[in-house]
Image: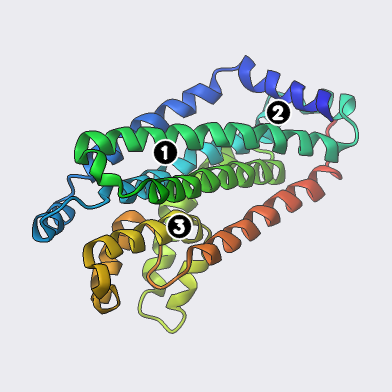
Amino acid sequence: MGGLVKAEFRKIFTVNLWWALLIPVAVLSFGAGWIGTAFGSIEQMQEAAGRSLPTGLLTVSMSTNYSTIFAALFGALAVAGEHRHKSITTTYLTGNPRGAVLGAKLIAYTNIGLLYGLVNVLSASIGGLLGAGLDGFGNPVDWFTVGGAGLLAMVLWTLLGVGFGALVTNSIVAVLVLVAYKFVIEFILSVVLLGSEIAGFVAYLPGAASNGIVGNLAVPIFISAVAGDSEPYVQVEAFQVLHFFFGGTYGHPWWLSLLTFLGYTAAFVLGGWLVSRRRDIT
């Protein structure tokens, strides 16, 4: 297994895709951290409170929600890219059994997912420092908590991408489906379900679940900093507005979002493994 993992790292760093997708993560996260801390309604809340508020935590959540797509795309091309370039035959023949190959890819891409997560959190934090200063992150425990959730979300999206790529094998289809679902299809589903009897199901959709891993931590921490002891009396609309912009779902615990998205990740990885071990590669 060690040799297979080393081989995967060689494949990753031999081509430019890993840093080509990492650059937009850094740029997007930095922009979200800088611009997000100057968001109009948030600035008004700070003025009303008369003190600095942990707006940086919200922007870490927002940057994670958008940046995870790049990790997912990178993961999807782990297997689908090899099918496109016809190198999958050699990979499977030299790394038999096929399950070991997928396992090696999961190990290698977990580490790359951590790298993407670190770049995301640090870039968003630097942008937040410029926009809100050091006081814009609350206490260090809150920053490490939200940042750690961001790392976890990025890793899970990377692994989901690996599983999805192994499932569909077509790199173009994998990229188009992931982007379309994350930014179009799920949004349409959310709008359609809004106000219906099953509106609560939205929180269990893949995108909403992944957003909730970070957003359902960051938003309550921010509300607590604003309201203090009166937090239970804060209007629901305040939570909903923040969740709309920064991710998550009102009243939905972060750990339930984590378990939900972990289930999606496991399902795609398992599906990719089952399909890949029976697929003809000649």
Secondary structure of residue under mark 3: helix
Whichever of callouts 2 and 3 sits on the residue coming sooner in the sequence is 2
Whichever of callouts 3 and 1 sits on the residue coming sooner in the sequence is 1
- The residue at the point 37 percent across, 43 percent down is 63
Extreme-bottom residue of the structure: 197
Place of residue 174 in the rendered image (x, y in percent of width and height, measured from the top left)? 59, 42
15 on left or right of 273: left
Place of residue 130 in the rendered image (x, y in percent of width and height, measured from the top left)? 22, 33
Amino acid at pointer 2:
Glu
Amino acid at pointer 3:
Ile
Amino acid at pointer 1:
Val
* Residue indicated by mark 3: 185
- The residue at the point 24 percent across, 72 percent down is 237
Few, some or many residues within 10 Å of mark 1 (<14, 14–19, 20+): many
Quadrant location of residue 219? bottom left
Place of residue 257 in the rendered image (x, y in percent of width and height, measured from the top left)? 52, 63
Few, some or many residues within 10 Å of mark 2 (<14, 14–19, 20+): many
Place of residue 112 in the rendered image (x, y in percent of width and height, measured from the top left)? 59, 31
Whichever of callouts 1 and 2 sits on the residue coming sooner in the sequence is 2
Residue 82 disc label:
2
Q: CA distance from mark 3 to mark 1?
A: 27 Å
Residue 121 disc label:
1
Report the mark closest to the observer, 1 or 2: 1
Report the mark closest to the observer, 3 or 1: 1
Question: Which quadrant does the N terminus fall into?
Answer: top right
Residue 185 makes an appearance in the image: yes
- The residue at the point 37 percent across, 74 percent down is 194
